[in-house]
């Protein structure tokens, strides 16, 4: 094992593990971040396998899998309506499974077929580029796709260029991971740099404290596969701690302070406030942003209604209505989130038609927001429990399950969010300035 191999393998493995954990920790519910994290983990495992057994089929397969995950991440970014997204997501999964089997059983040269899904996904993104946010994302991803393809060609068809190919592929995936984080932060209205910078500093410390000793150990014991795997395991653990710092800290509190619930709750609130400050955008005038972005923020806030931590990071916590409700109270991110939740609940309540509960067309927007967002009920869940909910809520759940397809429910949520956004927008601009009605059917993720 040469010094050059160690100099590439150790930082590439550690940084890939760290960024994968950071993306998952940022928002595990987002398919885009899950696909990208999977690509980074597969690359890290491929680097470890290549270090132990250079040129092995296992290492090549693991290093080719990120291209498939890369394509999945791009597909999940496509601005599609709920009706359009379901068949495309299913098709992407089936094609991904088929291509995975192909790269396992095809000979070395045939594994280059993994670039086909990536080309298809980018073609779809370019067709919808006017609705992709940020606008430069299709171009940036195309450039990185070219770099990734060149790296795979170098890896699969040359022997002398393997080291450079693995380094270039790792750089490509790190940049793609950053782009996906930027896209997610833009969609949710959160800040990225302070939180990412703090996590990166922690990872640099891991590289210095654990990476250098691991590299020296690999150099001194070049033929000991067990020692090499142990060093990569230590690096993976340290990188996971750097990427999942907040989650690990909360898990430790649950274990160490299991018998002291008040102290654990107080510490959790303080840590969540601190994390929210890192990801909450600097205060700005909401009327300076565009209507489409304001609508996206409203949709996101309604979807996150039951998650106070996510609401604390929403730019809508700077709404004038929230400021009025906070007058004379403690101004903390979670306090703002609670007031934002109250404002959203009032907006939804104002949409309720007069009279007893109904399921007519006049009721559909209120029903979809009140029961699916405010109460957090999922009528289509097989494990839905309605114990303790009102009779009205049980009737609504039964109605959705029997008569309203899931895709229609999602579309109603989008349309109802438009009405809530209009109410909030009037309060922001101080006069009736309706959001564009075309936004009701605009494709967003």
Image (cartoon, rainbow, N blue to C red):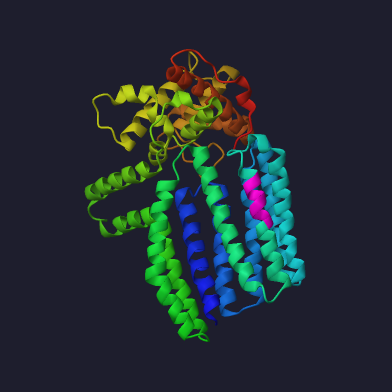
Residue 198 vs 352, above or below: the answer is below
Q: Quadrant of the C terminus?
A: top right
| Residue 103 horizontal/vertical position (percent) | 72, 66
In the rendered image, residue 377, in percent from the top left (x then y), is placed at: 48, 36
* Residue 70 vs residue 346, the one in the foreground: 70
Quarter in which the N terminus is drawn? bottom right
Q: Is residue 140 covered in magenta? A: yes
Count of numbered circles in the view: 0
Q: Residue at x 23, y 25 (%)?
A: 328
The answer to whether residue 323 is magenta is no
Up the image or down, 330 lies above or below 181; here it is above
Q: Which residue occupies the foreground of this view, 266 or 236?
A: 236
At x 54%, y 63%, the residue is 41
Percent position (x, y) of residue 413?
56, 29
**Where on the picture, by quarter, is residue 252?**
bottom left
**Quick one: 164 or 130, which is closer to the camera?**
164
357 in relation to 17, above or below: above
84 or 262: nearer the viewer = 84
Residue displayed at 49% across by 79% down? 228
* Residue 61: x %, y % from top left: 66, 69
Which residue does the image show at 47% across and 21% down from the upper left? 425
Going by the image, does 101 lie left or right of 271? right
Tell me where residue 132 sits by quadrant.
top right
Q: Is residue 176 visible?
A: yes
SS assignment for the magenta stretch, majority: helix
> Where does the magenta region start and end?
139-146
């Amino acid at each position: 094992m040469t010094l050059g191999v160690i100099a590439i393998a150790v930082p590439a493995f550690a940084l890939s593990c760290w960024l994968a954990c950071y993306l998952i920790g940022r928002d595990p519910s987002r398919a885009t971040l899950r696909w990208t994290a999977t690509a980074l983990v597969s690359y890290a495992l491929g680097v470890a396998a290549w270090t132990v057994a250079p040129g092995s089929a296992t290492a090549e397969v693991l290093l080719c899998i990120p291209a498939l995950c890369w394509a999945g991440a791009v597909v999940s970014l496509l601005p599609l309506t709920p009706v359009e997204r379901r068949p495309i997501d299913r098709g992407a999964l089936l094609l991904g499974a088929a291509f995975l089997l192909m790269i396992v059983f095809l000979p070395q040269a045939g594994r280059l077929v993994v670039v086909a899904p990536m080309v298809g996904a980018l073609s779809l993104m370019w067709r919808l580029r006017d609705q992709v946010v940020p606008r430069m994302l299709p171009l940036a991803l195309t450039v990185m796709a070219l770099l990734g393809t060149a790296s795979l060609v170098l890896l699969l068809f040359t022997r002398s260029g393997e080291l450079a190919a693995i380094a270039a592929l790792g750089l490509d995936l790190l940049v793609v991971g950053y782009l996906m984080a930027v896209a997610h932060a833009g969609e949710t209205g959160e800040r990225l740099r302070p939180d990412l910078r703090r996590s990166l500093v922690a990872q640099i410390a891991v590289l210095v404290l654990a990476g250098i000793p691991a590299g020296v150990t690999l150099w001194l014991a070049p033929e000991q596969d067990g020692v090499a795997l142990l060093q990569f395991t230590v690096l993976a653990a340290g990188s996971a701690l750097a990427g999942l710092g907040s989650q690990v800290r909360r898990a430790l509190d649950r274990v160490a302070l299991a018998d002291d619930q008040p102290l654990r709750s107080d510490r959790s609130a303080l840590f969540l406030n601190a994390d929210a400050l890192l990801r909450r955008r600097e205060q700005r005038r909401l009327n300076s942003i565009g209507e489409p972005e304001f609508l996206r923020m409203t949709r996101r806030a309604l979807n996150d209604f039951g998650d106070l931590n996510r609401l604390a990071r929403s730019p809508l916590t700077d709404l004038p209505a929230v400021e009025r409700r906070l007058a004379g109270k403690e101004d903390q991110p979670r306090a703002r989130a609670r007031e934002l939740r109250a404002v959203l609940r009032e907006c939804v309540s104002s949409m309720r038609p007069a009279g007893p509960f109904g399921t007519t067309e006049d009721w559909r927007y209120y029903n979809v927001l009140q029961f699916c967002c405010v109460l957090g009920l999922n009528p289509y869940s097989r494990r839905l429990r309605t114990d303790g909910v009102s009779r009205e809520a049980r009737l609504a759940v039964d109605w959705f399950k029997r008569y309203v397809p899931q895709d229609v429910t999602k579309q109603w949520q989008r349309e109802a969010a438009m009405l809530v956004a209009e109410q909030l927008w009037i309060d922001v601009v101080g006069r009736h300035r309706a959001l564009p009605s075309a936004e009701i059917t605009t494709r967003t993720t």
